[in-house]
Amino acid sequence: MNDHAPHADHEHEHPTWKQYKWVALWLTLITAAEVWIYYTPFASTSGYVPTLLLFSATKFAIVVMFYMHLKYDHKIFRALFTGPLIIAMCTLLAFFALFSHRAIPQ
Amino acid sequence: MASASSLAEPHEHTHYTTTGLDNRKVAIWAFIGSECMLFASLISTYLIYKGKSIVGPFPHEAWTAPDGHVFKAILNIPVTSQSTFVLLMSSLVMVLALAAVENRGKPGYAGTLLGNSKLWLGATAALGATFLGYQAFEFTSFVHEGLTIHTNLFGSSFFTLTGFHGAHVTAGVLWLLTLLSIDIKRGLTPKDAILVDICALYWHFVDVVWIAIFTLVYLIK
């Protein structure tokens, strides 16, 4: 191990206070929109769940990219996060595929 | 084992891996990756059991027991929306705490509100504790309304998932309070930014897990 290697954690500068403020505003607005559509007739349509998933995925990506600085950090950190995340998503889909089959009547 | 004095002093020798990356930061990202898989398994368990409870109370619809007792829909969306907002704001003050430590003494931070790391660390811990207060209120009201971890499949999977998340928030609050006590005792310098950075990464991860839980558990009917 090299104790004096150059610090390569930060590929670029982190966002500024103004950018953090905008990120917080967007997160709040998306959350407010999610809660608002829960109480509208749109909640009983087929487009409701995909819309919520899209909102949730957007919020997830915003926090990971800007607050966790993954957009600005080293690609190894990106790999350490996205690799297990992809495995987790595949596991989730595999569980759904396994358990969504209805029992065949004997 | 590290002595008390070595813990109290800033680390003079930072250990980097052959990639040039701090090994503590590599470790926290690897840990967060493993946590993704833990929460994916808990969330998939909840979703697989969703709608399969034989007896109520149910999350989104009322239920009448055989004895005639009517149980209302158990989830309280307005209260959980407030706790979600609190956790989102805690992420904002967490990044401000990290920026305050990283930029200590620099123009725009020295002697200003933005440079007050104690304030931002304390605010993050307080908001985390507030979120836990909301969760305690929610769990208590659910138990009073007849839903426990033993009641039905919904109760078992709900309390396990949200309980695990709450335990992670509790660990995060304790971590933040530890950093705050170090900051009060000797002051966190830019050399210590990595300590705040890894705590911030953990805290934001707890936040993104809640983003998923809020949508999948509370909003999807």
Image (tube, coloured by chain):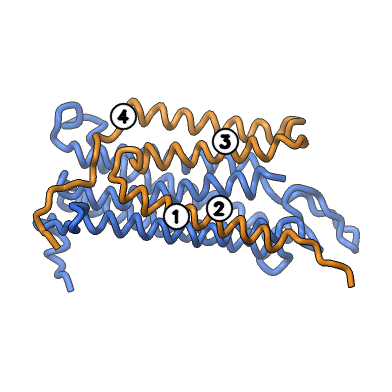
Chain colours: A orange, B blue
| Residue labelled with disc 3 | A55
- Disc 1: host chain: B
Tell me the element at label 1.
helix
Horizontal and vertical percent position of residue B2: 16, 70
- Disc 2: host chain: B
Mark in the foreground, 3 or 4: 3
Q: Is residue B43 above or below residue A35?
A: below
| Residue labelled with disc 2 | B135
Q: Which residue is rendered at x = 42% and y = 31% of the image?
A: A23
Q: Report the amino acid beneath label 3.
A: Phe
| Residue labelled with disc 1 | B169
Q: Quadrant of residue B47?
A: bottom right
Q: Which mark is residue A17?
A: 4
Q: Nearer the viewer, residue B148 or A78?
A: A78
Mark 1 vs 2, N-terminal side: 2
Tell me the element at label 3.
helix
Mark in the foreground, 3 or 1: 3
- Quadrant of the image containing the C terminus of chain B: top right
Q: Report the amino acid beneath label 4.
A: Trp
Decide: marks 3, 1 in contact (CB < 8 A)? no
Tell me the element at label 4.
helix
Question: How far is disc 3 from disc 1 in space, using C-alphas?
Answer: 23 Å
